[in-house]
Amino acid sequence: MVDHARARRLSKRITQIVADALEHEVKDPRLKMVTITDTRVTGDLREATVYYTVLGERVDADPDAAGAAAALASATGVLRSKVGAGTGIRHTPSLVFVPDQVPDEARRMEELLARTRESDAEVARLAASASPAGDADPYRVPRERDGAEEE
């Protein structure tokens, strides 16, 4: 039976252990700007997927994602042993490192929203100087009845 609460607690603990190990114990310079964002553990607690992002030192510089992926792959054994020692569970889950897509998707959404705002501003500018295509009042008004029609 799957204990989802236990899997969530274990994933949080793995996130803390891996982040602490990357910050203090693993001495690879390619992992200097790696941030652990999330961890997902399978229901049987045998596999853990660790999501990470690579932050650039400057805004205009692209981070070295390939170097960080290679460094994480080489440090997987050390990190797994740290997770095993830190969690105290019988079977230490295998670690798989996956780049997190959330920052890229958030950046893409911000660009889409900026384009939408520009488009809305253009439509508002055009609407301000527009005039109706038909009558000024397109709604029907009830006709006033003449005396002849009532009879």
Image: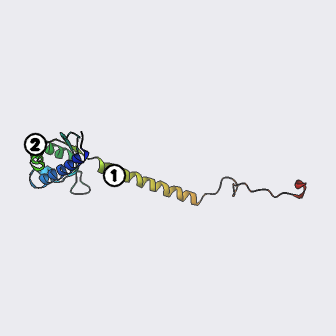
**What residue appears at the point 19 percent right and 41 percent down from the top-left corner?**
45
Relative to the observer, which residue lies in front, 86 or 117?
86
Task: Say which quadrant the N terminus sits in.
Answer: top left
Please report the residue visible at 21 percent of the width from the left and 57 percent of the height from the top: 57
Corner quadrant of residue 90:
top left
Compared to residue 150, the image places residue 1 above or below, namely: above
Which percent across, then down, holds residue 104?
30, 49
Can residue 128 be seen in the rendering of this structure?
A: yes
The answer to whether one can see residue 64 in this image is no
In depth, the one of 68 and 24 nearer the eye is: 24
The residue to which callout 2 is attached is 77
In this view, the residue in front, 58 or 97, is: 97
Disc 1: which residue: 106
Labels 1 and 2: the sequence-earlier one: 2
Q: What residue type is labelled 1?
A: Ala
The residue drawn where x is 76% and y is 56% is 142
140 with respect to 114 (left or right): right
Local packing at callout 2 (Cα closer than 10 Å; few below 14, some 14-19, many 20+) is few
Q: Mark 2 is on which residue type?
A: Gly
Quadrant placement of the C terminus? bottom right
Q: Give percent across and percent down for residue 77.
A: 10, 42
What distance separates the C-alpha of mark 1 from that of mark 2? 32 Å
